Image (cartoon, rainbow, N blue to C red):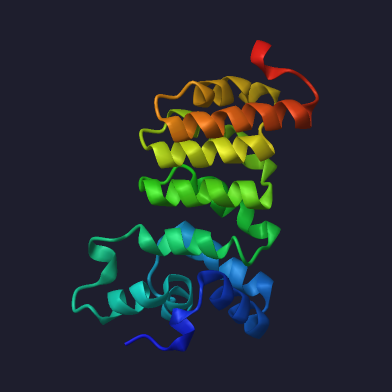
Amino acid sequence: MADASTEASPAQRVRALCAAQGEASVAAECAEIMRTGSWENRDLLVVLGGRVAVGEYARTEPAQSDLSYWAPTWAARGLLYAWSDTAAPAVVAALTHEAWRVREMAAKVVAAREIGSAGDAVAALAWDPVPRVRAAAARALRVVGEFEHASAALALAHDSDVQVRVRGEQAMAGMSARLDRDLRDA
């Protein structure tokens, strides 16, 4: 049974942990989980995953056997609320993770934390097979995309999925405004 701390929102849980351990420490631990996919840091994963994580640890079989993507996904989500620039390389690496949920959440972190070094990796996600990943990539490109990423944003603006198209149009508009140039002719 989950206690009150697992009933709080992920943002509330991570911020409370940051108050107790320090934001840089929590961000470093999240980055390490993203790099390794490890389920060894039970206390942090329960904070990050809440009731679902508690349930995974209660299983008789190891949680990582069929849901290996949850730990790095939760760790990436944790970086929305706890940040250190030292976590950026782990986020960029996670953009190529085999699990789409990890790629999607990493792209969300790129947008939220404005990780400019992720531009090329995010642009590559414009052709990801999962629409949710492509939509998250478009949001990230809006924030960190450069002129050389205009073709990726344009591809997203013409995507077959309506939600991705909307995000792609927003990426084109945001990049054009931020870079002070019309990218439709790029």
Q: Residue furthest right?
A: 180
Q: Is any atom of residue 155 visible in this view?
A: yes
Tally the numbered discs. 0
In the rendering, at what x and y percent does residue 81 appear? Answer: 61, 66
Q: Is any atom of residue 186 visible in this view?
A: no
User: Does 130 sit above or below residue 47?
Assistant: above
**Residue pictured at 69% horizontal, 57% vertical:** 85
Relative depth, front residue between 62 and 183: 183
Q: Is residue 96 left or right of residue 11?
A: left
User: Does 184 sit above or below residue 108?
Assistant: above
In the rendering, at what x and y percent does residue 168 appear? Answer: 55, 29
Relative depth, front residue between 149 and 136: 136
Q: Residue furthest left?
A: 60
**Residue pictured at 59% horizontal, 80% vertical:** 17
Q: Say which quadrant the N terminus sits in.
A: bottom left
**Residue pictured at 37% horizontal, 77% vertical:** 51
Q: Residue furthest top?
A: 185
In the rendering, at what x and y percent does residue 45 appear? Answer: 44, 74
Q: Is residue 5 left or right of residue 171?
A: left
In the rendering, at what x and y percent does residue 147 appear? Answer: 70, 23
User: Does 110 sit above or below residue 34?
Assistant: above
User: Does 96 sit above or below residue 41?
Assistant: above
Relative depth, front residue between 33 and 136: 136
Q: Say which quadrant the C terminus sits in.
A: top right
**Residue pictured at 58% horizontal, 52% vertical:** 109
